[in-house]
Amino acid sequence: MPLITAVYGSPRYKGNTAALLKKAVQGARDADARVQEVFLRDLKISPCLEIYGCKKTGRCVIQDDFQNLLDRLLASQGLMLASPVFFYTVSAHTKLLMDRCQSLWVNKYWIKKVPFGQWTPVRKGLFISAGATGGKRLFDGMLLSIKYFFDTLDMELWNALLYRRLDFEGDVFKHPEYLDEAYRAGKEFAQALSE
Ligand SMILES: Cc1cc2nc3c(=O)[nH]c(=O)nc-3n(C[C@H](O)[C@H](O)[C@H](O)COP(=O)(O)O)c2cc1C
């Protein structure tokens, strides 16, 4: 039975990305995955202080809620991450998590000296996002960030569900087809992890 961590990266508990991720969690559970849910806004996570305390052991030295979350992520076979578009990238809550994972990057490329790009994926990631506007390149910036964040976790991007023109809390409920798609993606994600 695969273990999935579902990370809610929006400051809104009941926002658009949270509703979509909830559906994906439901789908994954219906496919018999174990899912642990984490709301980043409930955690105290410092920004990366760029002191490179991680250079010795590959582990971040700042003692806060990141440490427990990291252990949970490393124990998981899958990550379902949801973040709204904030200024064409991820939310600040999500970015804090990403930056603290620089310790994993240091571990992989500086300590273990893995040649760039030559790592074997051991995890899969499902990314969910929503933005208010409708531009073609709305998700370009965040997808680049996600690609390199997932790299630190030895994780391949399995799928990305990206929704435009969702702004106010609850807008997503006007699109039951988006919620259905998220449910199906969660289910298929759990199945892909079991293969
Ligand atoms: C600080 C902030 C920055 C935002 N930046 C963008 C943006 O660059 N492009 C965009 O289309 N929407 C932007 N939005 C709108 C949100 O992406 C949108 O409301 C989204 O549906 C929120 O998702 P949530 O309910 O899961 O938090 C921004 C909203 C906030 C609060």
Image: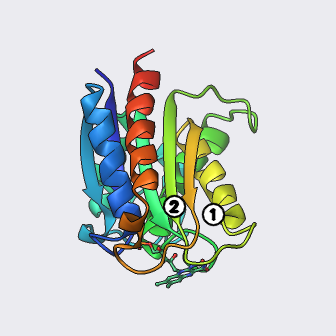
Q: How many marks?
A: 2
Camera-nearest residue between 84 and 36:
84
Q: Which residue is mark 1?
A: 142
Please tell me how crowded label 1 is: few (under 14), some (14-19), or many (20+) other residues with Cα within 10 Å: some
Q: Which residue is mark 2?
A: 129
Does 61 appear above or below 15? above
Camera-nearest residue between 47 and 21:
21
**Coloring scheme of the render?**
rainbow
| The residue carrying mark 1 has its beta carbon less than 8 Å from ligand 1 | no
The numbered mark, 1 or 2, whose residue comes first in the sequence reads 2
Task: Look at 58% across and 28% down and name the residue there.
Answer: 121
Task: Look at 28% across and 20% down and name the residue there.
Answer: 1
Q: Residue furthest top?
A: 195
Which type of secondary structure does the marked residue at label 2 adopt?
strand
Task: Look at 45% across and 14% down and name the residue there.
Answer: 195
Which type of secondary structure does the marked residue at label 1 adopt?
helix
Estimate the x, y position of residue 17 in percent, counting from the top left: 41, 63
Estimate the x, y position of residue 73 in percent, counting from the top left: 37, 42
For the question of whether residue 60 can be seen, the reply is: yes
Identify residue type, mark 2. Ser
Identify residue type, mark 1. Met
For the question of whether residue 107 can be seen, the reply is: no
Q: Is residue 190 left or right of residue 111?
A: left
What is the quadrant of residue 4 in the picture? top left
Does 53 appear above or below 29? below
What is the quadrant of residue 144 in the picture? bottom right
Estimate the x, y position of residue 87 in percent, counting from the top left: 61, 80
**Tags 1 and 2 in contact by the CB under 8 Å rule?**
yes
Whole-number angstrom distance, CA of label 1 to CA of label 2: 9 Å
Q: Is residue 86 left or right of residue 73?
A: right
Task: Look at 55% across and 69% down and name the residue there.
Answer: 50
Does 18 appear above or below 92? above
